[in-house]
Amino acid sequence: MNPTANAQDAATAKGASEGLKLHLAQHLEQQPETTQALHQWMKRLMVAGVGIIVATFIVALYVSVAWKSVNPIVIPLAWFVFAASVAPAMVFLGLDAIILRAFPPVVLPGKLPRFVTGNRAGWTGWAFVLGALLVAAFWGVFAYAVGTFNMVMLEPLIRVLAGVVGVGATISVLYSIYQKATRSR
């Protein structure tokens, strides 16, 4: 393992993050005050969305630990609500991208996406909103099916979930192999 490469990767990631922040700041300066004010509100709402994720995780964890004192059906329901809790933050992120016509509208930790503006950013924002609604609907229906123990609904939902996880895992493994193969050249 090359320690110099890791330091260079960290420096590159930090520089990319700073560059993304600079692009976003320059784009914000060109926007009218109403758009900038809406952006500030969307940032606050995104923080509230992250708070919802944290709160539902704490509740699901508590319910799981206190399993002797709660109705057993509450445990999976709490985890399904946790899975669906990403939806508000995703909706606010998407709406912010639509309003600003810039994506990403905030710099988040992790792998940095390419900064885009205009129609492409708007379509990305709409994709986030639609994705959030689909996630919330899927986990909501799953929670309802488990809560009512409706096997007619559960069977196809389990098949869909297993298929998505299987395909996602396969793609992840193949992508990892591809990355390692292209690096070794």
Image (cartoon, rainbow, N blue to C red):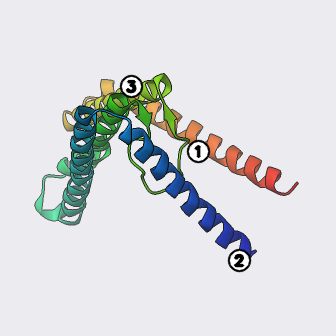
Amino acid type shown at disc 3:
Trp
Q: How many marks?
A: 3
Q: Quadrant of the C terminus?
A: bottom right
- Name the residue tied to disc 2: 3
Mark 2 or mark 3: whose residue is earlier in sequence: 2
| Quarter in which the N terminus is drawn | bottom right
Q: Mark 1 or 2 closer to N-term?
A: 2
Q: Foreground: 70 or 8?
A: 8
Image-based side of 43 in relation to 4, left or right: left
Tell me the kind of residue under disc 2: Pro
59 on left or right of 176: left
Circle 1 residues within 10 Å: few <14, some 14–19, many ≥20: few
Residue 75 locus on image (x, y percent): 22, 52
Q: Are marks 3 and 1 in contact (CB under 8 Å)?
A: no
Residue lying at 56% horizontally and 40% vertically, measured from the top left: 168
Residue at (77, 55) in percent of width and height: 180
- CA gap between label 3 and label 1 equals 26 Å
Q: Which residue is tagged 1?
A: 169
Whether residue 134 is visible to the viewer of this picture, yes or no, is no
Q: Which disc number belongs to residue 126? A: 3
Closer to the N terminus: mark 3 or mark 1? 3
- Which residue is found at the position 66% from the left and 48% from the top? 173
Q: Is residue 58 visible?
A: yes
Q: CA distance from mark 1 to mark 2?
A: 30 Å
Work out whether residue 59 or residue 109 is closer to the camera in this orientation and state it: 109
